[in-house]
Image: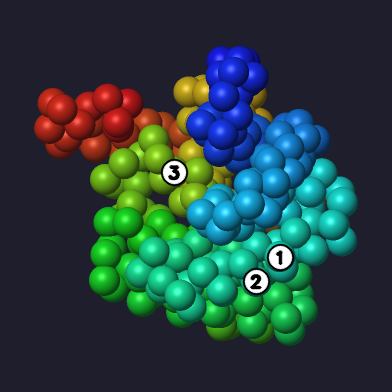
Amino acid sequence: MQLYRDLVANDVERHGPDLARALTDLGADLRTGGEHDDAVVACREAVRRFEDLTAVADDHLPDLARARAVLGAALRESGAYHAGIAACRDAVRLYRELAAADPDRHTAGLARALTQLGIGLRASGEGLAAAWEAVQLARELSAADPDRHTADLAQALTETGTSLRGLGAQAEALIVTSEAVQLGRDLASGNPARHVADLARALIGLGAGLRALGRRPEALAHEGEAVAWWWHLTQRRPGEFDEGYHEARRRHLHTFSPYDHDPDDLLTAESIARSRVLGYLAGVRAEAAPEDELRTA
């Protein structure tokens, strides 16, 4: 980041946009690692810089829309709920204008921004409407270009399932989240390093839906698999996925209910799930072409 700042100090017109994009990317990475307050700081600077740039020309409106979307998510996760929703709404508004002028280029951004808005407005009619719109757009994009957009569809489905559960539509939520898990499995089989975190989130959602319908053994199985995937991620990238791992374990323990099980049984179940995950990954690596081994490691 300091390199970009040094370049901007010498030539702001040429390097200012690069610094702002790097700040947006940094904010997104910090969010993934659970460093929400630092993510807010980086994204606020990115938004400010892109606002200055768009005041001169419209070339950087897509960058501004993305920066606001990431800022909205970071604000919400840091506890600034209302500010986060406002930023997400701004991002959706900008992406709608951009997609109306150039749908091929900006519809994907609109779908992602709607997904983030839906997350923030969960368990509300507006939140569900945003989530369903994101699913519809992502499904159309995925049908046209599955390699680029299936992951967006899976994430939108996961978040729509969460909204539906919050509104009491448990059966519908289960259908939606089951599709998210299936898509997540397909994606993870091709590139585990990139997609297992989203698969783990979808599995947690599916477990919650099954538990709500009284199907606890199935819920335990899916939540246990999610815990194992999060554990795998914490081993590969220490510190970055600890938050997801601990939340998954908390949910798994809640479903497990120590009141009618031996607590040691939970540890045994998690150990078995870890072994299955490691066995699955070994199979993926064995099937991968040599040039693909790095991305599945």
Q: Quadrant of residue 250?
A: top right
User: Residue 286: x percent and y percent?
Assistant: 17, 31
Labels 1 & 2 near each other (Cβ < 8 A)? yes
Is the Cβ of the residue at disc 2 closer than 8 Å to that at disc 3? no
Pick out the residue farthest to the left.
289
Quadrant including the C terminus? top left
Q: Residues within 10 Å of mark 2 (few under 14, many from 20)?
A: some
Give the residue at mark 2: 93
Disc 2 vs disc 3: which is toward the camera? Answer: 2
Residue type at the position of mark 2: Arg
Question: Can you give x and y, in whole percent of width and height, for residue 259 in the image?
Answer: 79, 50
**Which amino acid type corresponds to the residue marked 3 in the rendered image?**
Val
Residue 209 in the image, given as x and y percentages of width and height: 61, 69
The front one of 143 and 267 is 143
- Circle 1 residue: 90
Quadrant of the frame with the N terminus: top right
Q: Residue at x 76, y 75 (%)?
A: 123
What's the mark number on residue 196? 3
Which secondary structure lies at badge 2? helix
Can residue 199 be seen? yes
